[in-house]
Amino acid sequence: MLKRLVGIFTAVMFLSPTVLQAEPQWCNGKIKHVFVYRTGEVVVLGSWMNQWTTICNLNEEWKEVSAEQCKNWYSLIQTAVVTKSPAIVYYTDAPECSALPTYGNAPAPYYVMLREN
């Protein structure tokens, strides 16, 4: 029985390769809103997704993003919101932008870019 279940699971995974795979993602658009928890987590609502995602933490390392780097990204994000400029949040390995995990379950970005209007 167990051997059969393993075979079925393997077949399903082989036939559905997108279930577990992720790839580089360039999430382009406007950052509509940003807020910071008192714990330091920087959370954004980007136009590429109708849910909140954590980007980093201003007080401590979060998913290999240092607090110092987070301060740089937070500055860019604030500028993007105030000037209504487009931004790119790049992930090296993530599901498509519209399907990113929410809040603290989101992967850490590799970079945040502010673009010209």
Image (cartoon, rainbow, N blue to C red):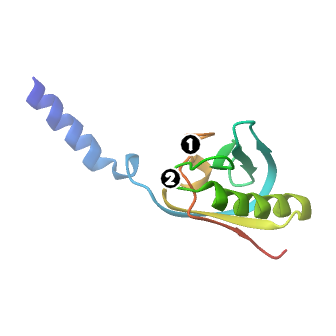
Which of these two is toward me, 36 or 29? 36
Which of these two is toward me, 99 or 90? 90
* Label drawn at residue 95: 2
Q: Residues within 10 Å of mark 1 (few under 14, many from 20)?
A: some
Measured in 3D between alpha carbons, the distance from the residue under mark 2 to the one under mark 1, in whole angstroms, is 8 Å
Which type of secondary structure does the marked residue at label 1 adopt? loop
> Does residue 107 appear to the left or right of 27 in the view shown?
left
Where, by quadrant of the figure, is residue 28 drawn?
bottom right
Q: Hey, which residue is sitting farthest bottom in the picture?
A: 116
Q: Sequence-wise, which precedes: disc 2 or disc 1?
A: 2
At 39% from the left and 53% from the top, the residue drawn is: 21
> Does residue 84 appear to the left or right of 49 in the view shown?
right
- Say what amino acid the circle numbered 2 marks: Pro
Q: Hey, which residue is sitting farthest right in the picture?
A: 83
Estimate the x, y position of residue 103 in percent, counting from the top left.
63, 39
Q: Quadrant of the N terminus?
A: top left
> Does residue 90 appear to the left or right of 3 in the view shown?
right
Q: Residues within 10 Å of mark 2 (few under 14, many from 20)?
A: many
Where, by quadrant of the figure, is residue 10 drawn?
top left
Estimate the x, y position of residue 72 in percent, counting from the top left.
72, 63
The answer to the question of whether label 2 and label 1 lie on touching residues, with beta carbons closer than 8 A, is yes
At 59% from the left and 56% from the top, the residue drawn is: 66
Which of these two is toward me, 56 or 98? 56
* Relative height, residue 52 to residue 91 (above, below): above
- Say what amino acid the circle numbered 1 marks: Pro
At 50% from the left and 52% from the top, the residue drawn is: 95
What residue did someone put label 1 on? 101
At 79% from the left and 61% from the top, the residue drawn is: 75
Instruction: Count the labels in the image.
Output: 2
